[in-house]
Image: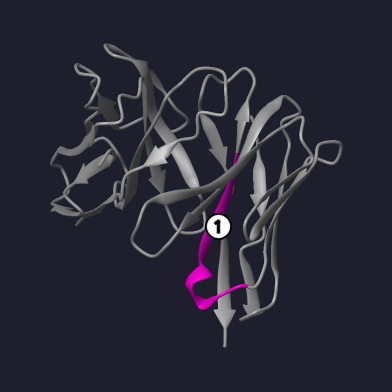
Amino acid sequence: GEDVEQSLFLSVREGDSSVINCTYTDSSSTYLYWYKQEPGAGLQLLTYIFSNMDMKQDQRLTVLLNKKDKHLSLRIADTQTGDSAIYFCAEKSAGGGNKLTFGTGTQLKVEL
Amino acid sequence: DGGITQSPKYLFRKEGQNVTLSCEQNLNHDAMYWYRQDPGQGLRLIYYSQIVNDFQKGDIAEGYSVSREKKESFPLTVTSAQKNPTAFYLCASSGGGTGGSPLHFGNGTRLTVT
């Protein structure tokens, strides 16, 4: 089946940029998503990108997609303490209806 | 405000008891989903429903059951057959279709079985 992988932890200083990486195996992915989860809460959609695009920017967030290498990244500019959370990438497969396959999540810690 | 409501936020049960988790949405979404979250394992799909009166098993359906009698509601029953029921359960909905249609999540129910 499809597999989505992320590193477990990332620590950055406040004001620096954060880059969270994700790799996936499904070559028929149609859309890729980034979600944020704060402690004890559900997942909040941050942004998503169509698989035919290679970049999407939304305020402090920049998504880069390398479809050839099946690599997705989320860059957060000027990272703030409020950005501390778990970040999940997810992919939608062409043949999978509207189901998403999620990565294990990356815990982002922002230090002062 | 449109959204997804999961209740209760915390649920405690004794081993051997069935328990039902509630999920209601007022987003007029056709599709609804149940995911289970365990530390370090991301989210795993339990069941999903693309339309009323129809649902399909996800990757880890054993020990769970669902119903979809109304568009707004998709309750999940954790049965006594589920070997490791203690987890954080997340319900989601989406507009369906072939476009981006991202999933929108509720705030989750933390189930503890002792």
Residue in view at x 30 percent, y 24 percent: B28
Place of residue B82 in the rendered image (x, y in percent of width and height, measured from the top left) = 29, 38
Subunit under mark 1: A
Place of residue A45 in the rendered image (x, y in percent of width and height, measured from the top left) = 49, 46
Residue in view at x 47 percent, y 45 percent: B43
Given the current orientation, which residue lies at the most extreme bottom position?
A112
Residue in view at x 23 percent, y 25 percent: B72
Residue in view at x 61 percent, y 72 percent: A79
Looking at the image, which is closer to me, A26 or A111? A111
Q: Is residue A69 left or right of residue B82?
A: right
Looking at the image, which is closer to me, A42 or B113? A42
Report which residue position mark 1 lands on: A87
In terms of image quadrants, where is residue B76?
Answer: top left
- Residue range of the region highlighted in magenta in the rendering: A79-90
The quarter of the rendered structure image containing the N terminus of chain B is top left
Given the current orientation, which residue lies at the most extreme front position?
A59
For label 1, count other residues whose C-alpha is less than 10 Å away and answer few (under 14), some (14-19) or many (20+): many
Place of residue A36 in the rendered image (x, y in percent of width and height, measured from the top left) = 50, 55
Q: Is residue A19 left or right of residue B51?
A: right
Q: Is residue A66 left or right of residue A82?
A: right
Q: Is residue A16 left or right of residue B86?
A: right
